[in-house]
Structure formats: structure tokens, C-alpha cells
Image: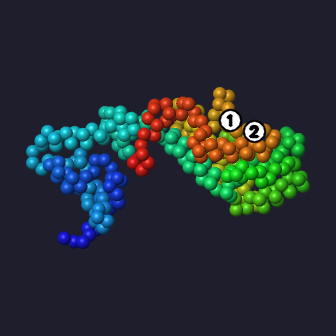
Amino acid sequence: MPSSIPPLPGLTRYTRWDLVPDGLQTKTMLARQGLKPGADPVGQVLYHGNSYAPLYEVTAAVPKRRVSPAQRAVLDRARELQYQCRRCGFLGEEPLGKGRFCDPCRYAMTLWEQHHQAQLLARELVADPAAVLLVVDVEPDSLPEAQGVALVGVRDRQVLYAAEAGEYGSPERGAVLDRLDVLLAGRRVVEEPDFMGPHSRYPHALLRLPNSGPVVSGRDPLHPWAAPSSAANDSVTRIWAGWFGWTDRHSSTTACAPWEWSGDTPMPWSRSLDLAADGQSMAGLLHRIADGTEPVWERAAWTLDGYGVGLAEGSA
Ligand SMILES: [Zn+2]
């Protein structure tokens, strides 16, 4: 007997038994039920730390001799599992295919995944001492002294900087840009809006002529923190929207910010002339999402059907 059995080329390797999908078994396991493989192996599992055993589809297995009622039950159960949603138990008329989820569950889990990712990102930001909220308000029609900028630490909610931003092209605005270049060097910048948010609140608004047209995406070589593309910086609105789980129509699989369309949902952070306070309010929101205490939309897809996520991590 060889001291180890090397893996077969081209077959998925599972290094732990709990990673092996339902419905795959070794020859030995099949034999215990009076079955033998009926097709080529579809995977292999590591055992004894140095050997691989081929894995076969139970549904393709054939009886070693004649089918006993117990063997028939095993085969029927394995076939039935292919028609049954792993989250809600719905029994379909067609095999459910990869992942084995019905359509409503797939929809709910897609939105739950955005919710989950939002929390992971919030936790990452809250734990990062270099993450900072850059809050900007530069309305084209406002008085110069109403145009401001503030920096607030995400983790400690300390105000690092707050200033009037002056008018575009003024010495005041130039001094603010210089200061931000220094303060934001090497920091992870979180901004307020996403692509649906108010344009006067993008960091890039500090660099734009009032009422000028759309900006090209990509980072500004002089002021990299003023990324005009909404995907370049993390965004409080985007994180919260993913967490909250609101969708603009029933079939949409992308969570978005409801306050653009509906007054039913109050914003969970303040938007005022006190930008430092607004930044602290946003930092508080990120902390609540990280902690899981921030409310979720009462009609978020994964909460409506009562199945929650329904699956342990790693089993999908
Ligand atoms: Zn289902």
C-alpha cells in the first residue's frame, strides 16, 4: 500500500469533509449502502492529510446487485435534493442547478449579500485609524461663507479639520485644497454621496467651476482625494444603501438610496451647514452598521420571507 495517494488531475479538490457538497460520496461510502459509482468521479477529498479519495455523484450511483427498498430510498432522496431549495425547502419541477436555490431565494440572497458586504466594509473602515470622512458642501448659488469642508476620523469621530471653502478660484479655496492635500496624504477617504447623491457634496465639487458640466472619471493627479468617479472613494450613501436593502422596484437586485424618490424614509445622518457635525453623524452611522444596530428596511427582501440568510457561511 502506497504511503500516500496523489490527487487526480483536473478534479476539484476538497481539503475538508465539511466542504464536500451534498450528494458526493466516496466508493467506500457508496458501498456501505450497496451502491457503486455509475460515472466518473467529479471531485476528490483529502484524507489522512496526504491522500485523495475520488468522489462520485450519488445520483449516478448504481446498485451493486439488485435494489433494496433502503437503497431505493437513498437514491430517491439524492434525486429529490436536486429539486429542493436549500434555503426555503421549496420543491421545484425542474432540478434547481448550481447552488440549488429557487428564484425568490436567489433574489433575497443577492440583496442580503450587499447588506452583508456593507457591514464588512463598515467594520473595515471603523477599524482603520487612517480612514477619514471628507464632507464637502459647495452649492453653486450659495454665499462663499456657506461653502465648507470638514474632515472627521471614522474610528474616533474626531474633527480633524473644518473650514469655509471660499469661492472657486479664490485664495481661500486654494488654501483649503493645499491643506487637504497634506491632511489626506496616505489616508483612506470616505465621501458622502454615491452616484445618485447631491453633486455639491462630492469632494470633486471643490475643483469645479460652479454649474460646470459632467466630469470625467479617474483620480485627479494633483488632488487624488477628489476622485470624480463615485467608485474611487468609499461612500457613506452606498454603504448605507446596501445595508438598508431598499430597492426602487420589485425586481431590482441592486439596493439604492431611497431619499431621492421617497420621503417615507428619513436619512440616517444629518445634512446641515455644520459639516463637522454631519461628518460625526456619518461616522456614527458607520459604527452602527458595523455593530449591526442600524435599522434595515422593514421590507428588505431577505427579511420579508422569514428565512433570513438561511445558510451557514461557506456552504453556498
Ligand atoms: Zn427557496
Q: How far apart are the two marked residues, 1 and 2, measured between alpha carbons?
A: 9 Å
Residue, disc 1: 267
Dot 2, crowdedness within 10 Å: few (<14), some or many (≥20)? Answer: some
**Residue 202, image x and y in percent?**
73, 47
Dot 1, crowdedness within 10 Å: few (<14), some or many (≥20)? Answer: few
Query: Which of 112/98 is in front?
Result: 112
**Residue 262, image x and y in percent?**
65, 29
Q: Residue furthest top?
A: 264
Query: Which SS class for mark 1?
Result: loop
What residue is shown at x 32% (from left), y 55% (from top)?
A: 17
Tag 1 near tag 2, CB within 8 Å: yes
**Mark 2 residue type:** Arg
What residue is shown at x 32% (from left), y 65% (from top)?
A: 49
| Residue 109 in sight in this render | yes
Horizontal arrangement in the rendering, residue 233 relative to residue 3 (left or right): right
**Residue 247, image x and y in percent?**
57, 34
Q: Image quarter for residue 176?
A: bottom right
Q: Tell me how many marks there are.
A: 2
Query: Which SS class for mark 2?
Result: loop
Label for residue 88?
none
Query: Which of 255/299 is in front?
Result: 299
What residue is shown at x 35% (from left), y 35% (from top)?
A: 89
Q: Is residue 132 above or below residue 110?
A: below
Residue, disc 2: 271
